[in-house]
Image (spheres, rainbow, N blue to C red):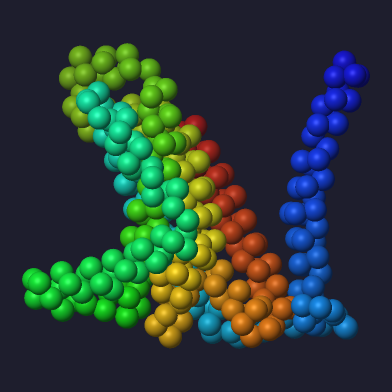
């Protein structure tokens, strides 16, 4: 047993060291630099909570945080609804369901930057052409206003991640005991009753996993935001990740950008842990 344990620690050591070097050390250094006047090269003195105090007077950061929260709520709901709907469709027995699974999952394989530019072309060129054809002025300049820019990001997010979320729902749907559904159907339960009282409780763990994934991906989204709207118009569609990047590298305020990153980390951790806690609790109740 001692020899087996030694080999276990031997093989896990590189991964553990990499985790410390890539995650733990940068996190600790980042927290330290957020209390200094770090300029990206060196820090000459401690400034205490001055960087954190400046955050709450930064209207751009507060606006980007509020925009990110709104975007996350809408995209989480839509992505999970679409993903679950697709999963329910492709788990039915019909010819071509495996092909549809591949088609629905493919958008997740496209890089975020490329995907943003693709949808930028669709919103600007394709929507404008359709608007001219049918006489709808609202389809023109789709990314030129804060409202349409917001929905453009939501559409992009939902289209990209719905297929990935679908795969997780499929795994739980196919692992269900079909005899329960057959028994409920024999007892006279309709489609909605079978879905609400049997399917939903049985796939409750999938909701926990998918809510966590969509929540974290929504909050941390940067590359799609950069390539689709670049935060415009007038930073009205700028998300928190982009605001932090622009503060650190655009304005060369490294310490302030790091303080924003720490606050952002705390917000994401708090929201994610709260979501997992209540989702797990809900699983037991169901």
Residue 243 in percent (x, y) is at: 56, 76
Could you tell me which residue is drawn at 38 percent across and 17 percent down?
A: 177
- Residue nearer the viewer, 278 or 135: 135
Q: Quadrant of the N terminus?
A: top right
The number of numbered badges drawn on the structure is 0
> Which quarter of the picture shows residue 138?
bottom left
Q: Is residue 232 above or below residue 24?
A: below
Residue 260 in percent (x, y) is at: 65, 73
Could you tell me which residue is drawn at 13 percent across and 76 percent down?
A: 132
Whether residue 227 is visible to the viewer of this picture, yes or no, is: yes
Could you tell me which residue is drawn at 81 percent across and 69 percent down?
A: 32
- In the image, taking residue 139 as reference, residue 154 lies left or right, namely right
> Which quarter of the picture shows residue 143?
bottom left
Residue lying farthest to the left in this orientation: 134
Residue 111 in percent (x, y) is at: 47, 56
- In the image, taking residue 92 as reference, residue 48 lies left or right, namely right
- Residue nearer the viewer, 282 or 27: 27
- In the image, taking residue 26 as reference, residue 135 lies left or right, namely left
Could you tell me which residue is drawn at 23 percent across and 68 percent down?
A: 126
> Which quarter of the picture shows residue 164?
top left
- In the image, taking residue 118 as reference, residue 141 lies left or right, namely left
Q: Is residue 108 above or below residue 228?
A: above
Whether residue 80 is visible to the viewer of this picture, yes or no, is: no
Q: Quadrant of the C terminus?
A: top left
Q: Is residue 285 above or below residue 17?
A: above
Residue 56 in percent (x, y) is at: 61, 81
């Amino acid at each position: 047993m001692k020899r087996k344990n030694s080999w276990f620690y031997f093989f896990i050591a590189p991964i553990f060291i990499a985790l410390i070097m890539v995650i733990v050390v940068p996190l600790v250094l980042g927290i330290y630099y957020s209390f200094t006047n770090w300029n990206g090269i060196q820090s000459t003195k401690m400034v205490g909570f001055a960087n954190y105090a400046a955050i709450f007077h930064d209207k751009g950061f507060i606006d980007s945080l509020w925009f990110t929260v709104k975007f996350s709520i809408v995209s989480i709901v839509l992505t999970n609804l679409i993903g679950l709907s697709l999963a329910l469709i492709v788990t039915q027995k019909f010819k071509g369901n495996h092909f549809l699974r591949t088609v629905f999952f493919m958008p997740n394989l496209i890089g975020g930057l490329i995907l943003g530019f693709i949808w930028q072309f669709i919103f600007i060129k394709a929507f404008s052409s359709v608007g001219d054809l049918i006489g709808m002025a609202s389809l023109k300049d789709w990314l030129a206003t804060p409202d349409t820019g917001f929905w453009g990001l939501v559409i992009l997010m939902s289209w990209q991640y719905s297929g990935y979320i679908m795969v997780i729902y499929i795994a739980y749907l196919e692992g269900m005991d079909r005899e329960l559904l057959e028994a409920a159907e024999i007892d006279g339960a309709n489609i909605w009753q079978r879905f609400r009282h049997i399917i939903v409780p049985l796939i409750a763990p999938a909701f926990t996993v998918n809510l966590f994934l969509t929540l974290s991906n929504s909050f941390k989204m940067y590359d799609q935001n950069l390539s689709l709207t670049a935060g415009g118009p007038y930073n009205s569609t700028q998300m928190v990740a982009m605001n932090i990047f622009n503060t650190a590298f655009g304005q060369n305020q490294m310490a302030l950008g790091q303080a924003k990153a720490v606050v952002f980390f705390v917000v994401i951790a708090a929201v994610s842990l709260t979501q997992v806690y209540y989702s797990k609790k809900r699983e037991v109740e169901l």
